[in-house]
Image (spheres, rainbow, N blue to C red):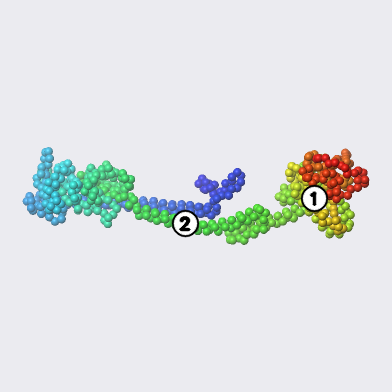
Amino acid sequence: MQFFDTIKRFLSPRPVGGAFQESRLTIRIKLMTIISVIVALSLGLMIFLATYFFLADSRIRVEENNMKLTNVTSASVSSLINSVRQIAEVAASGPAEGARLERTLFGGDRGWIFFGEYRAGDPAPRQVRSLINRQYLIANDLAERDIAGLTTRYAGAFQRCFQGSVSLVNASPGFRSPIIGLCFPYERSAGEKSALIVFQKMDSFLAAFQSEGGGITQNIMVSEDGSVVAHSDTRVVLAGASMADSPIVDAMRRSRVDNGLMRYTEKGGEAYLGAYGKMAFAGVGIISTVREDLAFEAVYGIRRRNLLLMGAVICLALIVVYFFASGISRPIKRLTGAARLVEEGNYDVNLPPESRDEIGVLTNTFNSMTRGLRERENLKVSFGKFVNKELAELSLSGELHLGGERKECAIFFSDVRGFTAMSERLRPEEVVEFLNQYFSEMVRCVNETHGTVDKFIGDALMAVWGALKSYGNNTENAINASLMMRAALLEFNRSRGTGRKPAIHIGCGINTGPVVAGQIGSDEKLEYTVIGDAVNLASRVESLTKHFGVDILITQHSLEKVKNTYRVVKMDEMRVKGKAKPVVVYAVLGRMDDPGCPRSVEELRERVGIEFDAKAHGRSFKDAKYSPA
């Protein structure tokens, strides 16, 4: 389970710092990796198990073959030794004439080189008689002393014959062809112990140690001290090599049983599989051994071919998965690109499904989602034409609830001067067209300063700053909006001034104070607005613009929020409905950082086209000075 959890964590996206980070491991790479791992593990496990069991079976067969060869070779060598012994005993018991005996021993193709009879003596055995194959001496350029001296050289090995044991030695060192020396105990008469010593060419012996067809198995005969007596390689026999330090020879010498099997490693690091069998001749043993890499070469060859086949299967699987994954990743990439277009606000996306599987279902579902989002966006746009855009988004997201919240806001009211008389001269359609054009400019000014249009009341407009979201400078934004309206109205009046398109003037009143903002109404009909004394005062201040002959008035509360920002002129204190104390208002000339700001109220009136009868209102503001707010 921990392994699969690790794989899952590796293939899953890791959030970095709480944000999604796209992985470089695409679906194509993941599929190719997973399929490759599965194929490699499956075929690898099959190859491993097949190789394991094949090796185990092959090892059993090799060991059986080694043991069989050991037994066969041992029987063959025993038969040869017994044959030589019989001939030697016949020669020892026959007539002593040399010529006849030589023909008996050296005639034909027996390969005899020397025959001698010795009796036990002190300090050394005493030779009774001896015969040498002179033809062999001539053919090999040898002298009689070369052969006769062999008995002295191997006297220690032959000494045991007088105790009744057969001895044999490798007498090849120093000669050009392999020679074996045999010593048999012989008793001519009661109590008279003799030994028959024979030196013979080893051709017939070595034939038993040669592998058929040049096989990989080596047959070896070693003496009790580990010296090589016979070997499948003639060069080893001629060298008179010793295998006393070989693990299998050491195991054979120490073993209490006559045969055995073992795997061993020589000093060079090569591993062998061998079998040994002891003979009943003076501790001589027969060993059949084969190099492990040669014995299992066929197994290793099959494994290599299987691994190559596995590589080919994996490559084929990768090619198939690559194109299959492309069929998966391509529509997913199209979906990703379409999703990014939707994220950017483009809902006119329609992807034709490329298949009827899960990806096709996902594509069809995505198209349904984009249609729903497009309809929702259209609804939001349509709804936003009736209410503020931010209000529409909050309403669609379900974040607006019945009730209110106390906030400090800047409240704005504006009104068109002489609208009633204007409406009497125009048709209703022309009035509606005029109001749409006028409100379009005014609403733009409100939206660009982060305000919210609360409602339209005939030709009047109410806006609020700080109700839905406060930007920290609500009063400044409200005054900036009114100044933008002043400039927009001047531009608006450029193409007007006729009877059907009269020029218009507006009055704007701004007050800042605490209000309750929220949804007001019932569960079936709601209206987001602000209520409170600050709203009423803003409406009363707007009506004072007629009395003072200006277009923008702000209260003392609003002035305190924007000190040293605007050029203002203090107006007379006025009593308004709903207030016990007189209200001080200020006419806004413009921003202090505006070089084109009017310097007086009279200049303001002249610029915006306000006709003001000072006598009718009881005071002239012709010489009134501005004061910085």
In terms of sequence position, does the residue under pointer 2 or pointer 1 come before the other? 2
Q: How many marks?
A: 2
| Quadrant of res 246 | top left
SS under mark 2: helix
| Residue count near mark 1 (Cα–Cα under 10 Å), binned few <14, some 14–19, many ≥20 | few
| Residue count near mark 2 (Cα–Cα under 10 Å), binned few <14, some 14–19, many ≥20 | few
Q: Residue at x 47, y 54 (%)?
A: 39
Q: Toward the viewer: 74 or 485? A: 485
Distance from disc 2 to disc 1, alpha carbons, whole Å, reads: 74 Å
515 to 105, vertically: above or below = above
Question: At which x and y percent is residue 217?
Answer: 28, 52
Q: Residue at x 17, y 43 (%)?
A: 154
Res 238 label? none
Residue 44 falls left or right of residue 607: left
Q: Residue at x 87, y 56 (%)?
A: 423
Q: Nearer the viewer, mark 2 or mark 1?
A: 1
Residue 340 falls left or right of residue 24: right
Q: Amino acid at mark 2?
A: Cys
Question: At which x and y percent is residue 521?
Answer: 80, 48
Question: At which x and y percent is residue 441?
Answer: 79, 53
> Which residue is tagged 1?
487
Q: Amino acid at mark 1?
A: Ala
Q: Is residue 516 visible?
A: no
Residue 198 falls left or right of residue 268: left
SS under mark 1: helix
Res 315 label? 2
Question: At which x and y percent is residue 407?
Answer: 77, 42
Q: Residue at x 81, y 42 (%)?
A: 567
Whether tag 2 and tag 1 are in contact, CB under 8 A, the answer is no
